[in-house]
Image (cartoon, rainbow, N blue to C red):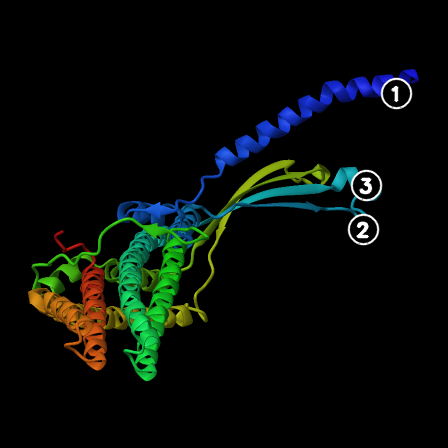
Amino acid sequence: MDKTSCERTRRKRIFGPLLASVLVMVVASWAAAVEPAPDRVTLAEALDLLEKQNPDTLAARLQVAQAEAERLTARLYANPTLSIDVNDLPAGRTNPPGLSPGQTIGGTVRLDQPLALWGKRRLRLQGAETGIAAAKEEERDALRQLRSAVKDAFYGVVHDRRLLDFTVTNRERYQQIVDLNERRFRSGDLAEVDFRKVELENLKRLAEEEDARRALAERRQLLGRLIGSAHGVEAVGSLTAPTAQIDGEQALLLAMDNRPDLAAAQRLRAQAELALDLARRERYPDVTVGVDYTRSEFVTGGNIRNTVGFGFSLPLPLLNRNQGEIAKADVNLRQADADLKRLRLDIAQDVHDAVERYRSARRLLLTFESGYLDHAKVMVDAAEKSYRIGAASLLELLDAERTYVATQTDFLDSVFSARASLNALERSIGVDVGSE
């Protein structure tokens, strides 16, 4: 082996393990920096991740940043204008004759500064500050709606998991009846048509289980999406429907005091009023003041070599007095008034409907909890025992089974409906009112 090959082999032995170690360290650092999405979350963790990772929440915060950029623009002053003029360059015969350009040339340097008068800058700043306040209220409103969506998805996962557990347990329990009837059928104690009815009923149980499994997977995926995860997330908690001691009038008062969309609309209305005031002030022109320095080489004609001057310019508002912008600002203010009035009516309707839905869901849940679940379980157990000893017909058994399944399913749906209606009530009011 030549000297070059030996050197190359030696370098591979030295730098190969070193490069591998560096790559391992880089990959480990990158993996540590990427925070994996959780597989299981509590409601508090889900709401916390909503504020940190949800793209809609981050987009609402960017709207606040954009409003703050508008305030930065409103704070800025107009730039001064620098102008330089060169004059008195001879373009023919001079007086006295024979003067060179160096003996006649002159120049002027002028600096002009526009001045915003009539309180226009103050109005722009006030409008920008009001815009920031409106953007922050809109961020709160987006979070209000997203929090409600997370709660619905979270308790939806809990509901669908309980429903899946019930369908699995119920199918396994019903499988015992299928096995019993299969033995009866093979021994000749049961007609084939009756056995096929039992099998078809078992098929319905399998379909119910698959539907529950699919619904749970979809709801987990939705919960993951809301908290910023690309895969499904399991909810850790129980399905409860706490009571809310609140009446319609109290709920409406709370909504008017706490709804961020109403506060945002009020801020936007104030911003429109400031914009109208600013448009009216724009009828009065701003003044531009300036100062200049002139140097002339044509002193033979009696000119002063160095001079300083100043002046100002003022547009005359004879034709354009900002009539169009004033009219537009007036329309925007009236539109903001209409939007505010419509929103108050919408909030009243929203709160009324939410209160009624919550009351209805609570009444239905209390009806189930008053003993109907126990009655359905007693009926199906009695029907199974009677059927096993031949004291009840197959139709009676199947009817009791269907009643039991429907009662259990409707009960779980009623608990989730009560929970969802409470979430809707809290969303319509803008504050949490349920007591666990």
In the rendered image, the vertical position of residue 397 relative to residue 161, given as above or below: below
Q: Mark 3 is on which residue type?
A: Leu
- Against 59, is 101 above or below? above
In the structure shown, which secondary structural element does the residue marked by tag 1 occupy?
helix
The residue that disc 2 covers is 91
At 32% across and 46% down in the image, what residue appears? 41
* Residue that lies at the very extreme toward the right in this rendered image: 2
Kind of residue sitting beneath label 1: Ser
Q: Tag 2's secondary structure?
A: loop
Task: Nearest to the eye among marks 1 and 2: give it.
Answer: 1
Mark in front: 1 vs 3:
1
**Going by the image, does 379 lie left or right of 177?**
left
Per the model, the C-alpha gap separating discs 1 and 2 is: 81 Å
Residue 383: image location, x then y, percent: 16, 73
Amino acid tagged 2: Ala
Residue at mark 3 to residue at mark 2: CA–CA distance: 11 Å
Closer-to-camera residue (185/177): 185
Task: Say whether residue 345 is visible.
Answer: no
- Callout 3 crowding tier (Cα within 10 Å): few <14, some 14–19, many ≥20: some
- Look at the image and tell me in which quarter the N terminus lies: top right
Answer few, some or many: residues within 10 Å of disc 1's Cα (few below 14, many 20 plus, some between 14 and 19). Answer: few
Q: Position of residue 124 (x, y in %)?
A: 36, 53
Residue at numbered disc 3? 99
Earlier-in-chain disc, 3 versus 2: 2
Corner quadrant of residue 22: top right
Against 272, is 395 above or below?
Answer: below
Q: Which of marks 1 and 3 is nearer the N terminus?
A: 1
Residue in the picture at 28% in, 65% down = 176
Task: Choose mark 3 or mark 2, whichever is in front.
Answer: 2
* Residue 412: quarter of image: bottom left
Residue, disc 1: 5
Q: In the rendered image, is residue 423 in sight?
A: yes
